Amino acid sequence: MAYEPIHVADAARTPLAMAQFQQSGNEVLGYVAWGGAVIGVLALIIIGGRMIHANFTGDPWIAARGMAELPWVVLGVVLLIASGSLAGMLLQGSYHETEDDLGSLIAGVAAEQNDVERESAGCEGALQDPDSREFVCPDDDGWERLSHSVPLTGPDDERCTRDGKADCYDYCFVSGFHDGNTAYTRSPCTPSGDDFALLKGDNWIWADYHCPNLPSNLWNESGSCPDNPVDHFDDVPREYARAGRGEPAMHKYYICTEFPEWANGNKREDQVGNGYCDVG
């Protein structure tokens, strides 16, 4: 079964539309009720006039028929006014029966629909193409491009944890992040050659989790990574250079100064270790 996607941006406009619909509905019901009352009064005047005329002409049959019609006219007016009031109460009750506005309800339906479509893709880590609205599996063409362009939902994003990884820090981490200029290419967070320009953009989605993996010459080239805090290896404070000078010292100072969340997220013994930023 195919599902037509519901756009959340459209759902955001529904509370105003609902208020306008409610106001228009109340106005229509008011016109109907007043129209019914006017028709009822006219009917009563006509029937009463016929009965008075019958009394003057001495025709009791017309007067009796008017008396028989009178209860039905009164009943019709009462039912018309009552039905309009009841319809208004039902509309008002249906609008206020939940604390969530209509926009939130439709957004929830859209989210549920996305979950259904994601499950129907039949794979773990499927991503939705913003253009076609279709879900693409990791083994399909186009998934790698989406993995570097669809915004992350946080460190526990599905694309980071689908292969048993703990989070995006674990997903992007490369063991030789400070040992050379090619280690970072082993990370799935490094865009391929065709998409390498994404790394240099100011909205690169993997910046928080992958900038510390990059060689120092790329820090200033990426618009999303903070600039190199020092101009040369010799400028690194002595306490950060005790484990070794050169690139390792540059990385340690850069990470502990600009990315303390990264160091905290990678406090696993097989990665940076618990005391990576303990200096002094």
Image (tube, grey):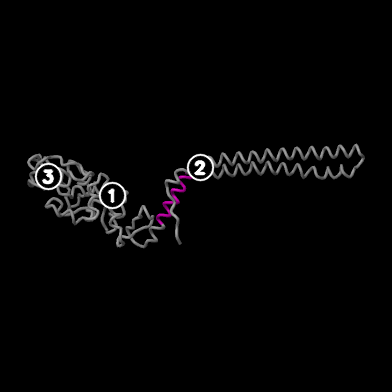
Nearest the eye: 174 or 24: 24
Q: Residues within 10 Å of mark 2 (few under 14, many from 20)?
A: few
Q: What secondary structure is the magenta-colored segment mainly?
A: helix
Could you tell which of marks 2 and 1 lies nearer the N-terminus? 2
Residue 272, compared with residue 51, is above or below; it is below
Q: Position of residue 18 (x, y in %)?
A: 52, 42
Q: Amino acid at mark 2?
A: Ala
Q: Which element carries disc 3, helix, strand or loop?
A: helix
For marks 3 and 2, give the CA distance: 57 Å
Q: Position of residue 246 (x, y in %)?
A: 8, 46
Residue 150, compared with residue 258, is above or below; it is below
Q: Which element carries disc 2, helix, strand or loop?
A: helix
Q: Amino acid at mark 3?
A: Met
Q: Position of residue 169 (x, y in %)?
A: 23, 51
Q: Is residue 111 magenta?
A: yes
Could you tell which of marks 3 and 2 lies nearer the N-terminus? 2
The disc label shown at residue 5, or none: none
Residue hosting label 1: 155
Could you tell which of marks 1 and 3 lies nearer the N-terminus? 1
* Residue farthest to the right, as pictured: 58
Q: Amino acid at mark 1?
A: Pro
Foreground mark, 3 or 2, reads 2
| Left or right: residue 244 compared with residue 88 | left
Residue hosting label 2: 17
The disc label shown at residue 250, or none: 3
Q: Is residue 180 magenta?
A: no
Which residue is rendered at x = 42% and y = 46% of the image? Answer: 9
Is the C terminus in the top left, top right, bottom left or bottom right quadrant? top left
Which residue is rendered at x = 38% and y = 55% of the image? Answer: 132
Stretch in magenta: 96-115
